[in-house]
């Protein structure tokens, strides 16, 4: 954790230096991006700066305990308990800010929902998840944008991408990454049999522009005609965009907007998000860190939750939590589940860290 805090503080100070650079000050888009990232890091970085200063003061006073001067020893004995208590309090506050990982304080993220096994029923379940997250975000006062959607003839989604912006978006939504399974009787089922289908959710932190340097030479841009459900032609102008990143092979397509320019802007945002996610994963693998739990792991192949409609039951398998209020959860009341996932993560982090001294 100390290593991560040092990195965040270093990045904060780097951004402070950049924002005082005349070249960046004259570039409004770069300045705005730097200021936005600086603001998102500010709370954590300033606390850690104060924490380091306290640690330095404690070290100085602790050294005075060995002083040959009795007055100095007495002063040190009087000051240290108060300083140590302040340091413990600050450390607890830092722990709280870092629950959920190093990207916990991101204020923007992209949520990708894809229908899995189960055909049209899976696509309808993907729509249910889309509506659940949409309602949850509305209840939080977050900004919501549908980036891209591939609807089906019956009103479901083969896949859909949402962008969220607001305080705590990634910290709370990241726990949704993984496989979601539904058990219910489909509307098209004449014999009333329960079917099982699935969807996957990926929650990706959206990087600031200054974090991912993406140039037009880094990707191929293809322009094509948009199409609707079942391949139905819906756009007579070539406005849809496909970007292929040369180095990583990542492909992003956008066709929701009628404007080619707007589709391109959205595609670039999603491409940067996926490149940042790939970078995070690469660094994670390089450090060979094995997560202690599946909470927040983002493993999309792992089934994290089951939605059982006949019993009005929802079960989160990572923390063995079962609630008989599926109807409320689907209406956007996700907070009870998210709060318990965060609390589980908090306990795991505290348990893994030893005393400060």
Image (spheres, helix red, strand yellow):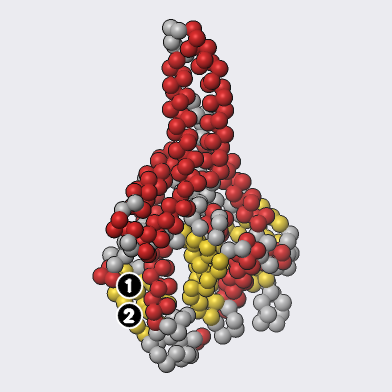
Q: Quadrant of residue 309?
A: bottom right
What residue sits 52% from the left and 15% below the top? 75
Secondary structure at numbered mark 2: strand
What residue sits 60% from the left and 59% below the top? 305
Residue corresponding to mark 1: 244
Graded by Cα atoms within 10 Å as few (under 14), some (14 to 19) or many (20 or more), the crowding at tag 1 reads some
Q: Is residue 63 left or right of residue 186?
A: left
Whether residue 190 appears in this view of the structure is yes
Residue 4, position in %: x, y? 42, 43
Secondary structure at numbered mark 1: strand
Pick the front one: 163 or 248: 163
Q: CA distance from mark 2 to mark 1?
A: 8 Å
- Seen in the picture, residue 157 relative to 103 is either above or below; the reply is below
- Seen in the picture, residue 319 relative to 119 is either above or below; the reply is above
Q: Is residue 125 left or right of residue 32?
A: right
Residue 69, position in %: x, y? 45, 7
Q: Which mark is residue 8?
A: none
Residue corresponding to mark 2: 222
Task: Confirm or deny contact between disc 2 and disc 1 (CB under 8 A).
Answer: yes
Pick the front one: 230 or 79: 79
Residue 32, position in %: x, y? 41, 61
Graded by Cα atoms within 10 Å as few (under 14), some (14 to 19) or many (20 or more), the crowding at tag 2 reads few
- Seen in the picture, residue 294 relative to 6 is either above or below; the reply is below
What residue sits 39% from the left and 54% below the top? 280
């Amino acid at each position: 954790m100390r290593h991560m805090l040092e990195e965040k503080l270093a990045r904060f100070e780097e951004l402070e230096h950049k924002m005082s650079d005349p070249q960046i000050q004259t570039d409004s888009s770069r300045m705005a991006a730097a200021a936005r990232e600086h603001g998102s890091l500010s709370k954590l970085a300033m606390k850690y700066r104060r924490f380091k200063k306290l640690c330095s003061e404690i070290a100085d006073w602790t050294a005075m305990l060995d002083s040959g001067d009795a007055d100095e020893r007495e002063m040190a004995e009087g000051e240290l308990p108060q300083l140590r208590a302040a340091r413990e309090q600050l450390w607890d506050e830092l722990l709280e800010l870092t629950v959920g990982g190093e990207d916990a304080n991101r204020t923007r993220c992209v949520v990708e929902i894809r229908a899995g096994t189960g055909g049209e029923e899976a696509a309808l379940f993907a729509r249910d998840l889309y509506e659940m997250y949409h309602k949850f975000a509305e209840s939080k006062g977050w900004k919501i944008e549908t980036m891209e959607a591939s609807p089906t003839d019956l009103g479901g989604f083969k896949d859909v991408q949402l962008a969220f912006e607001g305080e705590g978006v990634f910290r709370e939504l990241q726990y949704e990454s993984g496989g979601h399974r539904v058990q219910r009787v489909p509307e098209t089922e004449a014999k009333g049999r329960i079917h099982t289908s699935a969807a996957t959710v990926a929650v990706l932190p959206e990087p600031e522009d200054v974090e991912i340097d993406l140039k037009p030479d880094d990707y191929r841009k293809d322009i094509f005609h948009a199409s609707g459900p079942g391949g139905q032609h819906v756009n007579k102008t070539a406005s849809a965009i496909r970007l292929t990143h040369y180095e990583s092979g990542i492909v992003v397509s956008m066709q929701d907007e009628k404007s080619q320019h707007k589709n391109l802007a959205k595609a670039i945002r999603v491409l940067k998000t996926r490149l940042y996610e790939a970078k995070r994963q690469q660094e994670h693998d390089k450090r060979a860190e094995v997560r202690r739990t599946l909470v927040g792991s983002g493993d999309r192949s792992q089934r994290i939750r089951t939605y059982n409609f006949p019993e009005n039951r929802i079960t989160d398998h990572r923390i063995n939590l079962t609630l008989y209020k599926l109807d409320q959860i689907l209406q956007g009341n996700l907070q009870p589940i998210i709060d318990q996932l965060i609390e589980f993560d908090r306990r795991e982090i505290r348990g893994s860290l030893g005393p400060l001294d």
